[in-house]
Amino acid sequence: MDVGKFFDACDPSRTLAIAKPEDRQYYIDFAEVRGGKIIEKLARTINRTASGKHTCQLFTGHIGCGKSTELRRLEAELNQEGFHVVYFQATEDLDMADVDVTDILLSMIRQVSQSLEAVGIRLRPRYFEKLFGEIVDFLQTPIEFSYQNEFSLPYGLGKITAKTKDSPQLRSRLRGFLEPRTNGILESINQEILAVANDRLREQGKKGLVVIVDDLDRVDPRPKPSGKSQPEYLFVDRGEQLRRLNCHVVYTIPLSLIFSNESQALINRLGGGSRPEVLPMIPVQCRDKSTSDLGMRLLRQMVLTRAFPEVPAGEQLALIPEVVDTPETLDRLCFVSGGHVRTLMGLLYGCLRDEDPPIPRGCLERVIREHRDGLTMSISATEWQLLQEVVRQQHVSGEEGHEVLLRSLFVFEYRDEEGRWFNLNPALMETSTYKSWQL
């Protein structure tokens, strides 16, 4: 085993870029235990849509469940199909605690125009040239929009983003200026940027443009002055504007929205009648509390593949003693993660920070205790009551408080032949509170 390479591969902050061979070797397909081929469905919808028409699809799931890796896989597959795909993480440009529609639109166009310039397509929309000048006059802040003495759309947008991201006051003033111009901005984006881009891409032999906007599921749920949460305001109240872009778009959205009273409005306004695709956990248990053999096998394979990426799956089990002291220790690691891939990698990474492999059981138990205690510190008495209801009913409702359980990773969602069901994070099953329920 290359211990340094194994350590790097287990970094929980790492997203696999499937297009890169060195990352693709670590990828495990969990579709069989996640309720279907979700990424294939997203890709098929884009591929089967008639030329000249565009799709807007929604994708959600727990933060850390593997959405970004799956979206990078979607990016790689659509590129192979002949599309020009722009994948970006919204957190690069936006402050997730304070986001508005114009912020999202400008961030998207910066990323798109930058990607297009990389393939020789340089756009110079007159509306934005004029708008940039007006922004400078309004903010009374010097901003340079030319690059090498020539107007550059991505450079100019990048300068605006850099000026406003770390300044709430400046950002608020700019929004007040841009808000009444939203329809004009959308019209320019569609006619002067996306329409031209799609034509130029087809001249290059491409099928069209696809934009994948990741990390919007991290938008802070704080309330707006209207009383609605920030996600409801962005994706429901303003959903029709986000849907109006003349290219294929995939948005990540907060999981809590599908449990909101606004869920049907979300489906109709932003989803165009289609429900968001949800990426659930990999099951470690079944509804009847028996072990999920297939889920556990795939999680074992995930760990072993990070250690031995070049060894065929059928030969990896013989190498368990090089990773952990016993097979039971590996099963313990996989089970307590609940099938949440970032938790699994985080626990493993925590062990590797303490000791080199093979990891002894005692080291793993110390890391698990720290993980469990970190979770329980923030659980209120009311939330423990809600958790007890979830465990008994294996269901999460849209009632107030349940979104906290999901966002805080106290509860995980799974899929089987009967549909969706929910269970407690296995780390919480080891608490004295859970044991006192005598379920």
Image: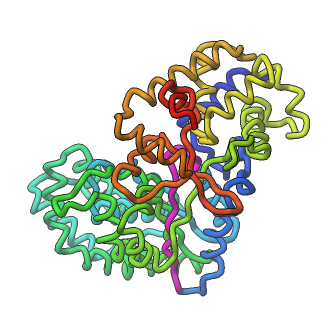
Residue 332 position (above or below residue 384) = above
Residue drawn at the location 37% of the way across and 71% of the way down: 242
Q: Which is more toward the observer, 113 or 283? A: 283
**Residue 383, x across and y down, in percent:** 38, 40
Q: Which residues are magenta?
A: 53-68
Residue 184 position (above or below residue 430) = below
Q: Which is more toward the observer, 333 or 157? A: 333
Residue drawn at the location 72% of the way across and 39% of the way down: 299
391 sits to left or right of 99: right
Numbered circles on residues, count: 0
Residue 30 position (above or below residue 340) = below
Q: Which is more toward the observer, 342 or 83? A: 342
Residue drawn at the location 37% of the way across and 79% of the way down: 192
216 sits to left or right of 367: left
**Residue 183, x across and y down, in percent:** 26, 78
**Residue 349, x across and y down, in percent:** 60, 25
Residue drawn at the location 44% of the way across and 68% of the way down: 122
Residue 128 position (above or below residue 393) = below
**Is residue 137 in the magenta section?**
no
Residue 362 image-quadrant placement: top right
Q: Which is more toward the observer, 330 or 67? A: 330
**Residue 47, x across and y down, in percent:** 65, 77
Quick one: quadrant of the C terminus?
top right
436 sits to left or right of 158: right
Quick one: quadrant of the N terminus?
top right
Can residue 68 be seen at all in this image of the molecule? Answer: no
Can residue 289 be seen at all in this image of the molecule? Answer: yes
- The image's colouring method is rainbow
